[in-house]
């Protein structure tokens, strides 16, 4: 009699968030789990689509929990059990917040595929938690977008004018110029609020986990979002469908 190889394997506990799911046969599915320990891994979830399966509701997209698996490096792992860490109820009950989550998930997974930096997991999780805590989702998303830029090889330099290197008399922020512009180099770039110049630097360097409150004017939020959107279009080469859907939802 053959004994399944999994019986002799040790169960591994991993923390993660389901970022994608694909049906497999009539009752099973394969999930893509973004984990703290191993990055993005594929996991076979046998029988979880059955109405009788306790894991049916625990293996849907955006489940955040501890997953007990038979881990196989560079192969499909197999799911044994799941413990929920957070149900992310605030996000999942709001179509706008869910649209933000869809976008940042597509963004982070695309960036991970290019960089394979495990540190992206903590960045992603911190952003989700802050949005679930009802902090301004556009600000949190913009912070995530800025922090992804170095992983894409197009990080910002926010200490001087991008044209001449002058560290003083910065008058505006321009995606076309790649960042700050000083008064000596200013020609016809759009002028932004001086607070926008300061806040974009704060966005870039702040630790997401440390944010507990956000008091930023709508003008500054709008100007920073415009800059980031233009910067992504010009330098990253990323065109994400979830971003277009989000913009449509917000009428941006």
Image (cartoon, rainbow, N blue to C red):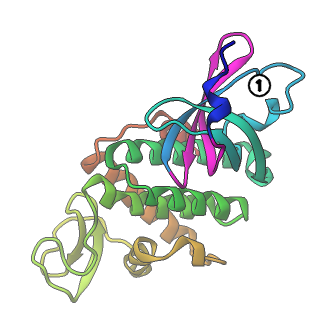
Q: Position of residue 221 (x, y in %)?
A: 51, 66
Quick one: SS at disc 1?
A: loop
In which quadrant of the rendered view does residue 63 lie? Answer: top right
Please report the residue visible at 25 percent of the width from the left and 81 percent of the height from the top. 159
- Prevalent SS, magenta region: strand
Please report the residue visible at 78 percent of the width from the left and 50 percent of the height from the top. 84
Quarter holding the N terminus is top right
Highlighted magenta segment, given as a residue range: 10-37
Q: Residue furthest right?
A: 52
Q: From what the image shows, is residue 86 above or below residue 21?
A: below
Which residue is more in the foreground, 252 or 212?
212
Q: Where is residue 101 in the image (x, y as percent from the top left)?
A: 61, 47
| Residue beneath disc 1 | 48
Q: Position of residue 57 (x, y in %)?
A: 81, 34
Q: Position of residue 153 (x, y in %)?
A: 25, 56
On whether residue 101 falls in the magenta region, the answer is: no
Q: How many labels does the image show?
A: 1
In which quadrant of the rendered view does residue 161 lie? Answer: bottom left
Please report the residue visible at 52 percent of the width from the left and 54 percent of the height from the top. 37
Which residue is more in the foreground, 47 or 218?
47
Q: In this view, does 221 lie to the left or right of 200?
A: right
Q: Is residue 5 visible?
A: yes
Q: From what the image shows, is residue 80 above or below residue 84?
A: above
């Amino acid at each position: 009699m053959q004994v399944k190889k999994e019986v002799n394997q040790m169960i591994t506990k991993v923390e993660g968030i389901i970022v994608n799911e694909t049906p497999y046969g009539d009752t099973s599915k394969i999930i893509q789990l973004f984990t703290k320990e191993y990055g993005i891994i594929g996991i076979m979830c046998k029988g979880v689509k059955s109405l009788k399966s306790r894991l049916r509701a625990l293996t849907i997209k955006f489940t955040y929990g501890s997953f007990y698996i038979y881990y196989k490096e560079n192969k499909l792992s197999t799911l044994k059990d799941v413990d929920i860490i957070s149900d992310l109820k605030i996000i999942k009950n709001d179509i706008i917040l869910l649209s933000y989550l869809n976008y940042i998930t597509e963004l982070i997974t695309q960036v991970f595929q290019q960089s394979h930096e495990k540190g992206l997991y903590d960045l992603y999780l911190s952003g989700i938690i802050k949005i679930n805590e009802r902090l301004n989702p556009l600000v949190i998303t913009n912070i995530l977008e800025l922090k992804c830029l170095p992983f894409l090889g197009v990080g910002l330099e926010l200490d001087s004018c991008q044209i001449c290197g002058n560290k003083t008399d910065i008058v505006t922020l321009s995606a076309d110029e790649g960042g700050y512009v000083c008064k000596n180099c200013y020609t016809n770039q759009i002028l932004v609020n001086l607070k926008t110049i300061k806040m974009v630097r704060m966005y870039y360097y702040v630790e997401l986990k440390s944010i507990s409150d956000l008091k930023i004017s709508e003008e500054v939020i709008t100007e920073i979002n415009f800059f980031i959107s233009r910067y992504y279009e010009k330098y990253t080469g990323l065109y994400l469908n979830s971003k277009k859907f989000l913009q449509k939802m917000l009428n941006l």
